[in-house]
Image (spheres, rainbow, N blue to C red):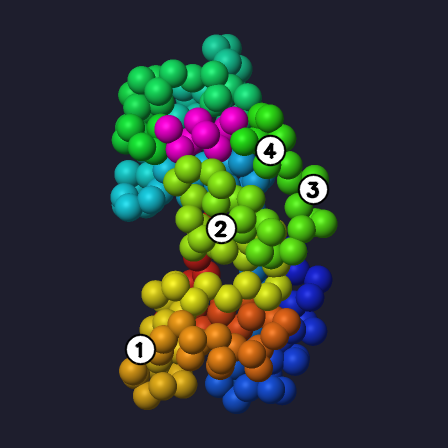
Amino acid sequence: MTKPPFWDEATRDLAARDPVLSRLIAAFPGLHLARRGDPFTTLARSIVGQQISVKAAQSVWERLVAACTVRGQAVDAARLDPERVQRKRIDTLRACGLSANKASYIRDLARHFASARLDPASWPALDDESLIAALIDVKGIGRWTAEMFLMFHELRADVLPVADLGLQKAVALHYFAGERPTPAQIRALAENWQPWRSVATWYLWRSLDPVPVEY
């Protein structure tokens, strides 16, 4: 998978500034953030996977893609078409295993893409907070989901998900002698990581789970 263009500069800079990150960067050579999937599919999968197991989410996802595929066409389990999703009845979406809320969220997301209210072509011109605001306008997408999308799909370099439990746990372990920090303490600590807070967060996650998670 292609390395983000800023990655090498970010790791050099962070290693020079922060002894903890220097050790972590050295401990995980060759790993980096990587984009996967198209924007609509990535966000739809994040909604499907909320509060259920990975196995259950995959089963629901496969049924959803099959239900939204034109008869006679090969099913591409890795992609969902917003135009087709927005035309589906809530009952049809629920029959795939979605809750009533998730069915509503998925269709709202599809409407945002089909109408270009969410237009990926415009996103490069938006700063992080503006893009987060556009994403959380969709039912079922909160700030944490939007932040994960910015990091893992848009490869934004300076996202700091202070509400993320993994980041809180890693910061407590490495910087606060095991005591859980407040969001304000995380933000203060992370001032030294700018403009590479996504990269710092990613390596702190690796200290808890060496296998990268993909969103």
Q: Position of residue 83 (x, y in %)?
A: 55, 21
Q: Is residue 121 left or right of residue 149?
A: right
Q: Does the magenta portion include 109?
A: yes
Q: CA distance from mark 2 to mark 3?
A: 16 Å
- The residue at which mark 2 appears reads as 146
Q: Is residue 108 above or below residue 204?
A: above
Question: Gap in Å between the C-alphas at discs 2 and 4?
Answer: 16 Å
Disc 1 residue type (three-letter): Arg
Identify the residue shown where x is 55% and y is 86%: 18
Task: Give the mark nearest the N terminus, 2 or 3.
Answer: 3
Q: Earlier in the sequence, mark 2 or mark 1?
A: 2
Residue 62 visible in rendering: no
Please name the residue shown 48% across and 33% down the image.
Answer: 109
Q: Residues within 10 Å of mark 2 (few under 14, many from 20)?
A: many
Stretch of the chain drawn in magenta? 104-111
Classify the position of the N terminus by image quarter.
Answer: bottom right
State whether the magenta stretch is mostly helix, strand or loop: helix
Of circles 4 and 1, which is in front? 4
**Is tag 4's residue or tag 1's residue first in the polypeptide sequence?**
4
Tell me the element at label 4.
loop
The residue type indicated by label 3 comes to: Ser
For residue 152, side relative to residue 13 (left or right): left
CB contact under 8 Å: marks 3 and 1: no
The residue that mark 3 highlights is 122
For the residues carrying marks 2 and 4, which lies nearer the camera in this image?
Answer: 4
Q: Give the alpha-carbon distance from disc 2 to disc 1, as whole Å.
A: 23 Å
Q: Earlier in the sequence, mark 3 or mark 4?
A: 4
Residue under numbered circle 1: 180
In the figure, 152 relative to 116: above or below? below
Residue in the picture at 63% in, 87% down = 16
The tag on residue 117 is 4
Image spot of residue 53 (x, y percent): 28, 45
